[in-house]
Amino acid sequence: MQTAFTAEQLATPRIAEANTILRKCVHCGFCTATCPTYVLLGDELDSPRGRIYLIKNMLESGAPATAGTVKHLDRCLSCLSCMTTCPSGVNYMHLIDEARAHVEETYRRPLFERLLRNVLAFTMPRPGLFRLSLIAARLASPLAPVAQALGLKRIAALLGLVPKPLPAPEAFGQPGTYAAEGAGKGRVALLMGCVQSVLDPGINAATIRLLTRLGFDVVVAGEESCCGSLTHHMGKEHDALDRARRSVDQWTKADVDAVVITASGCGTTIKDYGHMLRLDPAYAEKAKAISAKAKDVTEFLSGLDLPAAKGGLRLAYHSACSMQHGQKIKQEPMKLLRRAGFTVQEVPEGHLCCGSAGTYNILQPEIAMRLRERKVANIESLSPQAIATGNIGCITQIGAGTEIPILHTVELLDWAYGGPRPEKLSGLA
């Protein structure tokens, strides 16, 4: 793709990088076949290729983003399926991130949308505040049909995603160091996280139990709560980079062999810290070092010599977009589950997003609902006893659309290797 940035624009590192990415696109259109929004809507501007044209025009002009451009960029899930498909190596992830930052800096959204986005960006990365907001939302959840009838679709979607009931806080997983059982094999940090630590604290607890049984000291840092992913994908770069710096400081201080992550959406962002902080001389090298140590929990476990076990359930494995497209981790989780004794089936149309995508299922509820219905239908066609996945967003989104229990992969592995049976499986024989 030819571009027309001025020399003055190209002197800005962010524009120079966007120019390099744009010029790799050859208009082939392979990305359209695997883009969830294009598959649903059939609009070229809701495909990666169409959005690339919009981003090119927006950045070249240097003008504020327009409402039309923002509409189509907001519909992007950042699922990154297009990057898996692209034969030219276009780094769409970095391009859409730059576009969102430009939108946030130059476009004034309607008042209600602006307030909603600011509330989500403020509450979700703060576990204590997020828990309080969920309690309030749980009390208001019977009003979801009223909100829907009044046309407040985003509020209705938010209320519909509130867990019933809200899990109790989990002490096992709070900040501290958890000692290895037996001879120590290493020392790892575990991302405590923000949303996951509230919505499903048992995931981190299962991870700590499993890793300590396998001989690893596990450090949960005290000052890190959110990796910055949520606000990063909303274009709020100042907040996201501050959170990234805080996490880098914590994990550098902890002096660990690896940073283990149990939310694949967070993992994709943390593995990109080196890029996000490349222009910060005080953090560029430290961030690069932390990114190199970042491992999804299944990626970390795949490097260990685990014995066979007897899991005994028939599972459908849903590969989160951030796992298969963002981190290119595809076979490892299924291999681990099969070695642990589970029967694992891949979900048809597994490359298509479930519609969660951070705050997408709240900000774009109609598209998210259609994607969830499509995903759930594909999962239920397999008649599994349970669903395994590696991302809290997917667990929440898919779980709201099916009665089949959905668990994090590590919860099933912890159980198979001597941990307690997950409560979500209590209804199974």
Image (cartoon, rainbow, N blue to C red):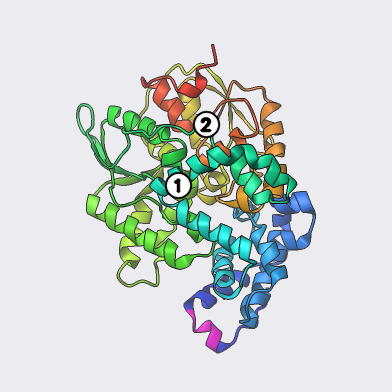
Query: Residue drawn 47% across and 38% down?
Result: 199
Residue 19, picture quadrant? bottom right
Query: Residue drawn 59% across and 20% down?
Result: 385
Query: Residue drawn 52% across and 31% down?
Result: 334
Please report whichever mark, 1 or 2, sits nearer to the chain's N-terminal start.
1
Q: Residue 252 in the image: state x and y as whole percent.
A: 26, 55
Q: Residue furthest top?
A: 429
- For the magenta stretch, what is the residue range? 8-12
Give SS at disc 1: helix
Q: Nearer the viewer, mark 1 or mark 2?
A: 1
**What residue is pinned by disc 2?**
334
Q: Can the viewer see residue 307?
A: yes
Q: Which amino acid is tagged 1?
A: Phe
Whether residue 153 sits left or right of residue 335 in the image: it is right
Give me the disc on residue 130: 1
Q: CA distance from mark 1 to mark 2?
A: 32 Å
Query: Residue drawn 71% across and 37% down?
Result: 373
Q: Residue 159 in the image: state x and y as whole percent.
A: 60, 42
